Amino acid sequence: SSELTQDPAVSVALGQTVRITCQGDSLRNSYASWYQQKPGQAPVLVIYGKNNRPSGIPDRFSGSRSGNTATLTITGAQAEDEADYFCNSRDSSGILYVFGSGTKVTVL
Amino acid sequence: QVQLQESGPGLVKPSETLSLTCTVSGGSVSSGSYYWGWIRQPPGRGLEWIGYVFHSGSANYNPSLKSRVTISVDASKNQFSLKLSSVTAADTAVYYCARDYGDYLSRYFDLWGRGTLVTVSS
């Protein structure tokens, strides 16, 4: 399969931990990248590779992979983390790309 | 600081060709380290990868759009472009250009343009 599956929505209490998952067969052979998108803005890369953060991304964001599932973890969620999160990876061909359907994170 | 900026018509008629350009500033589209890609997002929906082009001009496309898409690069203008033919209302979306970096294990879009809304309507 070349699809990446994400839960549509999750909520987290302020300061608590939330895990956002992305499932797909292609994740067995390549790492996911994760993007945060706030309303009216372009997506921003937050995690790539095994567990790498671009400059300027807080260390409360981390990534992991197990089997066909990639996970983005926000440890100590803040109000500004409320956004849509999309995963992306190469598909089964190894040449093309696919995005997950996105997860809306609400911080309570 | 490298920046990407999309440009092109915001309104396209059904059955016509959508044409957008992404201008790279502060860097070079000829860099062999990157692919240069297009991604779109219909209103209220998720992201859809359209395709990418390498500095050599070789390109790969989303199979669902492949028959209608062409992505090309113009090193002399430091730009890359998207053409999508025979558009319908379903092609209405915000179109983003993005820089694609990484290796065989991990590729990612580390830089994005601000996006441009293209509406398909008569």
Image: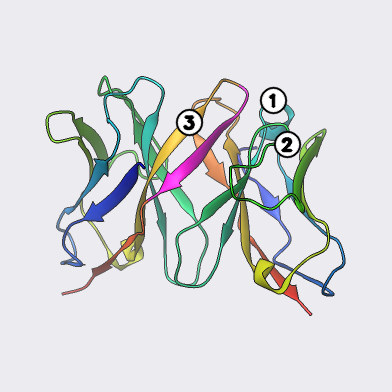
Q: Residue at coordinates 32% horizontally, 23% vertically from top-left?
A: B31
Circle 3 sits on which residue? B101
Name the residue type under label 2. Answer: Asn
Instruction: Look at the picture and state if A40 lies above or below B5.
Output: below
Which structural element holds mark 3?
Answer: strand
Label disc, if present, on residue A105 of the rendered structure: none
Q: Quadrant of residue A76?
A: bottom right
Q: Give A36 or A52, whichever is nearer the viewer.
A: A52
Name the residue type under label 1. Answer: Asn
Which structural element holds mark 1?
Answer: loop
Q: Residue at coordinates 69% horizontally, 66% vertically from top-left?
A: A8
Q: Looking at the image, do the residues carrying marks 2 and 3 touch, with CB atoms under 8 Å apart?
A: no
Q: Give A76 or A22, whichever is nearer the viewer.
A: A76
In the rendered structure, does residue B107 fall within the stretch colored magenta?
A: yes
Name the residue type under label 3. Answer: Tyr
Q: Looking at the image, do the residues carrying marks 1 and 3 touch, with CB atoms under 8 Å apart?
A: no
Q: Is residue B118 left or right of residue B38?
A: left
Report how far apart the C-alphas of labels 1 and 3 lie in the structure.
17 Å
Looking at the image, can residue A70 be seen? no
For the N terminus of chain B, the image quarter is top left
Circle 2 sits on which residue? A51
Counting from the top left corner in percent of width and height, residue B51 is at: 38, 38
Counting from the top left corner in percent of width and height, residue B43 is at: 43, 71
Which structural element holds mark 2?
Answer: loop
Report how far apart the C-alphas of labels 1 and 2 lie in the structure.
15 Å
User: Which is closer to the viewer, label 1 or label 3?
Assistant: 3
User: Which is closer to the viewer, label 1 or label 2?
Assistant: 2
Q: Quadrant of residue B121?
A: bottom left
Circle 1 sits on which residue? A29
Chain letter behind tag 1: A
